[in-house]
Every structure is written in structure tokens, then in C-alpha cells.
Amino acid sequence: MRAFWILEASGGGTGRHVLDLALGLAERGVEVHLAYSPLRMDAIFAQGLPLLESRGVRTWPIPLRRSPHPSDLGALFRLLAYARREGPFHLVHGHSSKGGALARLLGRLLGIPAVYTPHGVVTLSPFLSPWERAIYGGAERLLAPLTALALAVSPWEGEALRTLGYRRVAVVENGIALPPLTPEERASARTALGITGDTVAMGFVGRLDQQKDPLLALRAFAQLGLPQTRLLLVGSGPLDPACREEVRALGLEGKVAFLGEREAREVLPALDLLLFTSAYEGLPYVLLEALALEVPVVAAPLPGLGDWLQEKGLAQVAPSREPAALAKAMAGLLENPALADALRQRGRAWVEGQGLEGMVEKILALYQELVHPTKAGKSPWA
């Protein structure tokens, strides 16, 4: 099987998903050609490219802007030329909104099925204005008929896609492969970050932007009021200056450390608690990594994921997004070791039950259903 992938958001959880899935499919004999944009590429994705190439994944950089732009037409024709030169391909798979839009158009031009993974359905955002919601929702509805299969990483994303008119939607939850940590590895991680003695280390890991809401994390931490606590802020983004000003305003100098962009797996082992404050999400990798590494999670409520975490008993979810409510949930977890241990055990068990191998196998099976004709001789995507 030969698959042509298009990726604009070459970083964060989307980049991690693409790296893991491409490697897994390559190991199973799928020839993946990945067209990726270097414009938003993070260090983790850049470091993963040589491994992809060593395993037979063909990679090709093509600049793609995040927002709609006249240059998108030129990019489409470049992608079409590549597909005709290196093809034929059995399917085209677009990751994130821009990659997904180009993949659907390309699939129609090539006459092959198009797969779309949004990695966060844009209409789930509570920050859209009415006209933005109408525009983005309208674009999704226009592209839905060109989509052979929409892949959602969570049940609530799947429901959002069906609401937007997608006829065939499959939910394949993200999976990772991380071995459990030893006490020695945890101690080493704490030492490397300068966490000593009985200090309680909490972490926020994510882009410093409106969606991830790091300001809520800072305000909740300020209200916690417990001694010997420290908050590690991992990430970068447009709210970095606002976060630093908030630290000064709240009198948190010396208790909050800005670590910048780092691999989450370097920081999570050192934490006693992960603070998760996103306003909306699919199924983010930082959360899965925390579960795998047995780091208890305290989360602000958010659509879909908040209820899912509560139902499965994977996190302590605050009753509201008020800083005081989040601080109370954090204190409750820190003061209840039995609850923290239960969260660790359930988190590790869930990750092992899902797993990276399971995610890859499910997506491979869906690929095979698309490209192999049915008994009636008709393609299932037609």
C-alpha cells in the first residue's frame, strides 16, 4: 500500500501522532510519502525526521501557511505534481485543517480516497466568534462530501464531525508506548530540574496560548497556598509575556520556573502532579504521557474530555474553571495519597490497554477497507 500524507502543523501532538503512526505503518509494509510544512515545525518533529527516513518514509518539505492564503493554490499544484511523479498512490491522508483541506482536493484530482484527521475539530473552540464559526463550519461542510473517511481521536471529536456532515467517521484514540518509570529515574529527573527535598513539583505542559490557558494554571497555583511547592511551566507561545507579568503580579517569583519548549517526557517524571487547564482538546499526548508515566492529573472541566476523564477515573476534574475550584482539587489530591495512587494505577492500565500498536493496527485496517474493492466490485469510498 502506498499513502501520500500532507501535514501543515509539524509540531505538538499532531507532529507526535504523525511520527508514531508513520513509523508503525512503515514497519507493516506501508510506503508513506510525507509532505510536511517547516513553517511551524518544532524541534521534536525535526529530530524525528531522520528516523522516519531511515525506516523508509519519504519526506518532502513544502511551506504551508496555517491560515487560508493565495499561496495554497500553488501548493496544491506542487502536491499534485509530486503525486503524479512519485505515484500512483492508493490514498491521500491530510492531518490538521490545512493538510486535510489540501488532501481532499488532491484526492478528487487524483481520483483516490481522501482521509482526514483534524487533530482538534476547530468548531469545538469556545473562542470562535459567530462569523468565524460560520466560516469554519461552512468550510468543513463543503469538504465533507470529498472525504472518504474522517478519523477522530476521541468520541467527542467524532460527534462534532458527524454534526458537520461527515458520513463516515471512525474514532481511533491516540496511543503511545512508554515503559513505566523506576524510582531511580524519577529521582534523576527531579535532580536534573533542580527539585530537591520535599518540594512538591507541579507542571503545566503545553503551548502558551488561549486554548491551553496557562494563565488559569498560574492563578490556581497562586491560590493553592501550600508551602514547598513549585510550578514548572513547559512550553512557549504568544502568552509568554502575559504569563511572566502574571507571575510578578501574583508574587510567584521563585516559585514558578519557565522551562521553554522541552520534550514532555523529560519533565513529567519529575512531577508530583500535572495541571491540565485547556479550554478544549481532542485526546492530547501530554495527557497520555502523564497517564503512562503515572503522574496524577488535575484538570479544569472542558467539553468532552472532562467527562471522559471523570467517567474513566483517570483524573481529578475540578467542578468549575474558577482558580479557587482548581486549587481546591489540587489540594485534595495532594492530601489524599490513596486517591493519587488510584489515579496512577488506572492511568497506566488505560494506556497499556490502548497502546501505540493498537492505534496503528486500527488505522491500517481502515486503510485496507478503503483501498480494497468490496465483493460487489465497488470501492467503499465512492
Image (spheres, grey):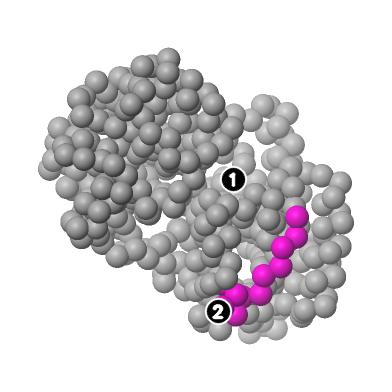
Amino acid at circle 2? Arg
Extent of the magenta region? 52-63
Residue at x-position 35% and y-position 22%: 252
SS class, disc 2:
loop
Dividing the picture into quadrants, the one containing residue 112 is bottom right
Residue 20 placement, left or right of 148: left
Q: Marks 2/1: CA distance? A: 31 Å
Residue 30 shown in magenta: no
Compared with residue 128, is residue 354 higher up or lower down, i.e. above or below?
Answer: below
Residue 329: x and y, percent?
A: 26, 29
Residue at x-position 43% and y-position 35%: 258
Neighbour tally class for label 1: few under 14, some 14-19, many 20 plus, Cα within 10 Å: many
Compared with residue 274, is residue 368 higher up or lower down, i.e. above or below?
Answer: below
Residue 143 placement, left or right of 232: right
Residue 156: x and y, percent?
A: 49, 46
Between residues 324 and 273, which one lies in front from this camera angle?
A: 273
Residue 337 placement, left or right of 205: left
Disc 2 designates what residue?
A: 55
Amino acid at circle 1? Val
The answer to which of marks 2 and 1 sits earlier in the sequence is: 2
Between residues 21 and 230, which one lies in front from this camera angle?
A: 230
Disc 1 designates what residue?
A: 121
Residue at x-position 58% and y-position 60%: 46
Residue 58 shown in magenta: yes
Dividing the picture into quadrants, the one containing residue 14 is bottom right
Neighbour tally class for label 2: few under 14, some 14-19, many 20 plus, Cα within 10 Å: some
Between residues 277 and 12, which one lies in front from this camera angle?
A: 12
Compared with residue 377, is residue 362 higher up or lower down, i.e. above or below?
Answer: above
SS class, disc 1:
loop
Question: Quick one: quadrant of the C terminus?
Answer: bottom right
